[in-house]
Amino acid sequence: MADTPVLPPCRRTVLKGAALAGVAGVGLTACTGPGSAVPDGPVELGAATEVPVGGAKLYREARIVVAQPTQGSYRAFSAVCTHQGCTCDTVEGTALSCPCHGSVFDAATGAVRTGPATKPLTTLDVQVKDGKLIAVAGA
């Protein structure tokens, strides 16, 4: 038998491998982001008027969601999913969704609406100071 020459991988194989590595890195970042579920100190989020009455606003950079169930009444929670630590990425009305495994939380109560998460979101204190929302750990 003649020796079969070993050919280098084709361009398509190399590009597929690079794309898959990039996608895997994105998933890893979403699920293992740095930091804890609660802020180390006070976090200024923005104007209180940004949070709709009867709805919620997600502050992605701070990993916090704030709901305003009734006019002038605010509730804040960590946006870190209690299933495996991913950061929730969308809020529609008061439904806060985790992209990693599909858990959905109630942004007004922190309760789990849809698993696999079984524990509610971590509650944070939230105050309005000079028209701005300030969130702190320890509710």
Image (cartoon, rainbow, N blue to C red):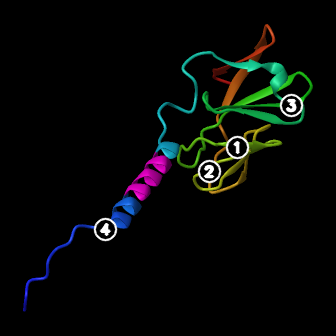
Residue linked to disc 3: 52
Report the disc number at residue 10: 4
Residue type of the residue flagged with mark 2:
Pro
> Which percent across, then down, holds residue 132?
76, 14
Circle 4 or circle 1, nearest the eye: 4
- Of labels 1 and 3, earlier in sequence is 3
Asked if residue 86 lies left or right of residue 19, the reply is: right
- Between 125 and 26, the residue placed more toward the observer is 26
Image quadrant where residue 133 sits: top right
Residue linked to disc 2: 99
> Which percent across, then down, holds residue 89?
65, 42
How many discs appear?
A: 4
> Which percent across, then down, holds residue 39?
57, 24
What distance separates the C-alpha of mark 2 from that of mark 4? 34 Å
What distance separates the C-alpha of mark 1 from that of mark 3? 15 Å
- Of labels 3 and 2, earlier in sequence is 3
Residue type of the residue flagged with mark 1:
Thr
- Could you say whether the residue bearing mark 3 is in a helix, strand or loop? loop
- Of labels 4 and 3, earlier in sequence is 4
- Could you say whether the residue bearing mark 2 is in a helix, strand or loop? loop
Q: Mark 1 and 2 residues: CB-CB less than 8 Å, in contact? A: yes
Residue linked to disc 1: 90
Asked if residue 71 lies left or right of residue 136, the reply is: right
Q: Which residues are magenta?
A: 18-28
